Image (cartoon, grey):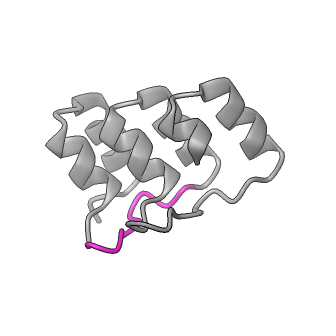
Amino acid sequence: MVAVVNGREATSRTLLEASARIDAVDDEAGWSSLTWAARSGRLALVELLLEHGANPRHLADDGTTPLHWAREGDHAEVVARLQVAGADK
């Protein structure tokens, strides 16, 4: 998750290929790596996480989703990619 938060695409890819837990959540808010990537507008990381099975409908402790944060940040490409992945179903 730290690699995603810091925008480290190559490190994230290496960890995912080594079977890192794709839907691990942080202790403070229950955010997944996909939530962090969506909030930051990091399309390449969003795509990478979705390709490895990240849940596009993950609910954080406060009930927000990756799609919520992508919309909040006006990250149109991330919003579109999450919708294609079924985030709004």
Residue placed farthest to the right in the image?
Answer: 18
Residue 40 is left or right of residue 22, and the answer is left
Give coordinates of residue 55: x percent, y percent: 49, 61
Question: Quick check: 70 left or right of 7?
Answer: left
Query: In the image, what residue occupies the spot 60% across and 55% down?
Result: 53
Compared to residue 85, the image places residue 75 above or below, namely above
- Identify the image quadrant of the C terminus: bottom left
Residue at 53% of width from left, 47% of height from top?
A: 50
Residue at the image point whose x is 59% and y is 27% from the top = 8
x and y, in percent, of residue 34 in the image: 46, 49
83 up-or-down from 75: above or below? below
The answer to which image quadrant residue 13 occupies is top right
Which image quarter: residue 58? bottom left
Who is closer to the viewer here, 25 or 88? 25
Label tally: 0
How would you classify the magenta stretch by its main secondary structure? loop
Q: Does 3 sit above or below residue 50?
A: above
Task: Give coordinates of residue 77: x percent, y percent.
Answer: 29, 29
Residue 59 covered by magenta stretch: yes
Q: Is residue 49 magenta?
A: no
Residue 12 image point, x, y percent: 66, 36
Q: Which residues are magenta?
A: 54-62
